[in-house]
Image (spheres, rainbow, N blue to C red):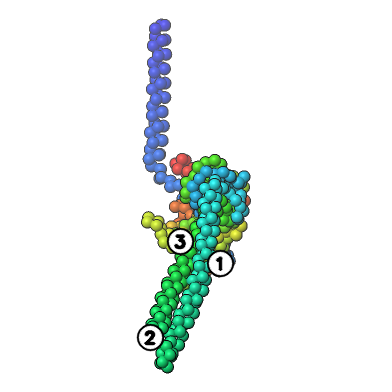
Amino acid sequence: MRFLRQGLLGLFLLSVTLGLLAYAGQTLRLAIEDRINREARMPERRERVFAVRVVRPEAETVTPTMTAFGRIESRRTLEIRTQAAGVITELAPGFVEGGTVTAGQLLARIDPADAEAALARARTDLADARAEVREAERALALARDELAAREEQADIQTRALARQRDLESRGVGTLTAIEAAEYNLVQARQAVLSGRQALALAEARVDQAATASARADLALSEAERRLAETRITAGFSGRLSQVSVIEGRLVSANEQLARLVDGRALEVAFRVSNAQYAQLIDANGTLRPAPVTVALDSGDVRITATGRIAREAAALAEGESGRMIFAALDDAPAMKPGDFVTVTVEEPPLTDVARLPASALGSDGAVLALGADDRLERLPVTLLRRQGNDVLVRAADVTGREIVTERSPALGPGLKVRRLTPEAATSGADEDATSAAARRAPRMGG
């Protein structure tokens, strides 16, 4: 009996299990058939609306600026060199690196002993030459007096001869007296000739003495100049740089001791491209004296100076391009030659222009503007200048239109957008995330 009950119970449990399995299979079959027979539901599609920032530009007059990088230079830089060789016996207290000197100030002195001795010899030689000139002039005067006396004697002998001939013609004189008078006249004439030769020699001596005196005068001037060359003075007021000498050092002729820089005659040299250069010339091709502003960034301090364009380089070196421009600075005491600065040049004012962010202009030379139904339109513009993060375009192209400030590859003509106000800028990211989640929801539910 017990075995029969257990057999019947096992048969009952087996029947229940088979029934549950059959029910589960039937339910699964019905669900699969219902899934297969049910029409596929397409998710609802919504047009994507992009949020953009817009700006409404207005026509205005703008003075464009050109930015370049340049180097401060001095229009007056003098190399202080020695003209004489010798030992430095004296240096000015301000003859140091960065020292300030004034025009005509004594900077250094070279041992003047040799030059002073040469000057003393030159003065002595000049005194001798001048004494020789005076002696030659006295000898000339004596030679002239002696010649005059001999000529007078010759005149007396001429009259004596004439008198003897007159006596002989009247039968009173003798032939011997006439011959004696003629002989005396010849002697007198020879004495006159000797006097003339002596006068010529005296005149030549005077000329030679004058030449020697002039030569001695030149030697004295040269000795004075060489003595003056032992004194090194400042040609103009300025600051010293590259000082390379100390007191007691032996220097040679033409050796550089320092450089004198005039800090009041500063200019900035900067290079511009050919396109930028075209904006700096007038209709006649002449470089305009445009105002410039020079800025030197020194940490938290910004040093500025003003000036005007003065000239341009006459030629370009091999391998260079563009143009080298020089601008004279008005007053820049804090700037030094060699400083690298930022140069801002003012161009002529432009009228009827509009200012837009540089990000609004695409590589195709057009901007995106809001049209009807808040859809984007491509709007070609004329680019006039680039000014840092902005661009200047012709105002007639964009006046009265709302221009997208930032172009991106996702934006294009025909897309629907909504204006992003400054208040909504902070929540724009959250809204975009919410929209993205909403677009993904139908696909997940399906």
At a point 41% along the width and 83% down the height, the residue shown is 177
Please, what secondary structure does the residue beneath circle 2 have? helix
At a point 45% along the width and 80% down the height, the residue shown is 154
Density class for disc 1 (Cα within 10 Å; few <14, some 14-19, many ≥20) is: few
Task: Tell me the number on the disc at residue 293.
Answer: none
Please, what secondary structure does the residue beneath circle 3 have? loop
Check the picture and name the quadrant holding the N terminus.
top left
Check the picture and name the quadrant holding the C terminus.
top left
List x then y, in percent, for residue 232. Answer: 55, 51
Q: Which residue is mark 3?
A: 313
Name the residue at the bottom extreme.
170
List x then y, in percent, for residue 146. Answer: 49, 73
Real-space Cα separation, disc 3 to disc 2, in angstroms: 102 Å
Q: Is residue 26 above or below residue 434?
A: above
Real-space Cα separation, disc 1 to disc 3, in angstroms: 26 Å
Q: Which residue is mark 2?
A: 175
